[in-house]
Amino acid sequence: MKTEVVHQLTATFEGHAQQTESGVEYWLPRDLQFLLGYTKWDNFQNVLTKARTACDVAGHEVGDHFADVGKMVELGSGATREVDDVMLTRFACYLIAQNGEKAIPPIHKYEDKS
């Protein structure tokens, strides 16, 4: 993989990192979904499920890397409601990328072809 591509992907990924008030770094799956080229949330949820399984099989506590949380979103009417979300660690993001569909352009395009 070319160095400039690695730098671009890293900058894009790091640019979506967020932090809790206590400084814990995390990513949100809906951000990662688009970074990895998924247009449908349902398709991406399948990848999340595979990544959670991979985390468990690797002997890690799934809840430590995939923390289920809720967040408030504004609806078109101006009202708000809570939706489910997940705070992902860097390791969780790695597992998601590893379990993604190879036919999705951002994943396939940057696969190591060596």
Image (cartoon, rainbow, N blue to C red):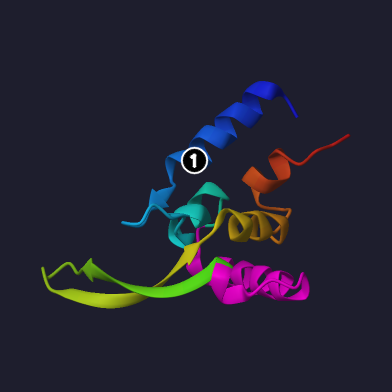
**Residue depicted at x 51% and y 57%:** 33
Q: Is residue 57 left or right of residue 81?
A: right
Callout 1 secondary element: helix
Q: Residues within 10 Å of mark 1 (few under 14, many from 20)?
A: few
Q: Is residue 47 left or right of residue 26?
A: right
Part of the protein shown in magenta: 39-64
**Residue depicted at x 60% and y 61%:** 92
Q: Is residue 111 above or below residue 38?
A: above
Q: Position of residue 114 (x, y in %)?
A: 89, 34
Q: Position of residue 46 (x, y in %)?
A: 62, 72
Report which residue position mark 1 lands on: 14
Residue situated in front as seen by the camera: 100 or 104: 100
Name the residue furthest right.
114
Most common SS among magenta residues: helix
Q: Position of residue 11 (x, y in %)?
A: 51, 33
Residue situated in front as seen by the camera: 108 or 12: 12
Q: Position of residue 52 (x, y in %)?
A: 64, 73
Total residue callouts: 1
| Three-letter amino acid code at the position of disc 1 | Glu
Q: Quadrant of residue 63?
A: bottom right
Name the residue furthest front.
22
Q: Is residue 113 above or below residue 30?
A: above
**Residue depicted at x 49% and y 67%:** 41
